[in-house]
Image (cartoon, grey):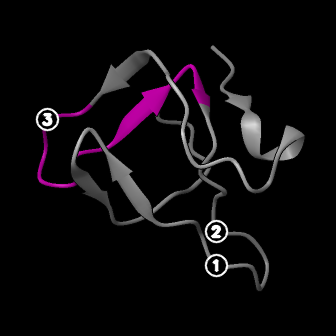
């Protein structure tokens, strides 16, 4: 399962549609989408912020959560 990185195609993209691939029901609320426009934390670059279906995105990262 590979998440398509929409931010590589258009770094200013603000709206996108994605399918939920995996979720974790713990207190962290981690999810994996089939594609994303949210840029993850990396190096000195902070992650993107915003909302998904009205819920605030608190952190964006790369993970082996799949």
Evaluate if marks 2 and 1 touch, with contact meaning CB atoms under 8 Å apart.
yes
Q: Is residue 28 above or below residue 47?
A: above
**SS under mark 2:** loop
Label 2, label 1: how far apart the Cα atoms are: 5 Å
Residue 14 covered by magenta stretch: no
Label 2 vs 1, first from the N-terminus: 2
Q: Residue 3, how many percent across, how many down?
A: 65, 26
- Crowding at label 1, few (<14), some or many (≥20) Cα neighbours within 10 Å? few
Q: Nearer the viewer, residue 59 or 17?
A: 17
Q: Is residue 35 above or below residue 11?
A: above
Q: Main secondary structure of the magenta part?
A: loop
- The nearer-to-camera label among 3 and 1 is 1
Evaluate if marks 2 and 3 touch, with contact meaning CB atoms under 8 Å apart.
no
**Which residue is labeled 2 in the image?**
41
Q: Nearer the viewer, residue 51 or 5?
A: 51
- Crowding at label 2, few (<14), some or many (≥20) Cα neighbours within 10 Å? some
Label 3 vs 1, first from the N-terminus: 3
- Examine the image and state in which quarter residue 1 appears: top right
Label 3, label 1: how far apart the Cα atoms are: 25 Å
Q: How many marks?
A: 3
- Examine the image and state in which quarter residue 47 appears: bottom right
Evaluate if marks 3 and 1 touch, with contact meaning CB atoms under 8 Å apart.
no
Label 2 vs 3, first from the N-terminus: 3
**Which residue is labeled 1 in the image?**
46
Report the magenta residues as a range. Answer: 24-35
Most distant residue in the right direction: 9
Tell me the tag on residue 25.
Answer: 3
Label 2, label 3: how far apart the Cα atoms are: 22 Å
Q: Give the residue at x 79% y 78%.
A: 43
Q: Give the residue at x 74% y 35%.
A: 5
Q: Residue 50, how many percent across, how many down?
A: 42, 60
Q: Give the residue at x 47% y 35%.
A: 65
């Amino acid at each position: 399962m590979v998440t398509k990185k929409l931010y590589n195609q258009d770094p200013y993209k603000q709206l996108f549609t994605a399918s939920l691939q995996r979720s974790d029901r713990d207190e962290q609320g981690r999810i994996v989408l089939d594609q994303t426009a949210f840029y993850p934390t990396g190096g000195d670059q902070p992650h993107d912020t915003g909302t998904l279906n009205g819920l605030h995105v608190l952190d964006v990262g790369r993970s082996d959560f799949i």
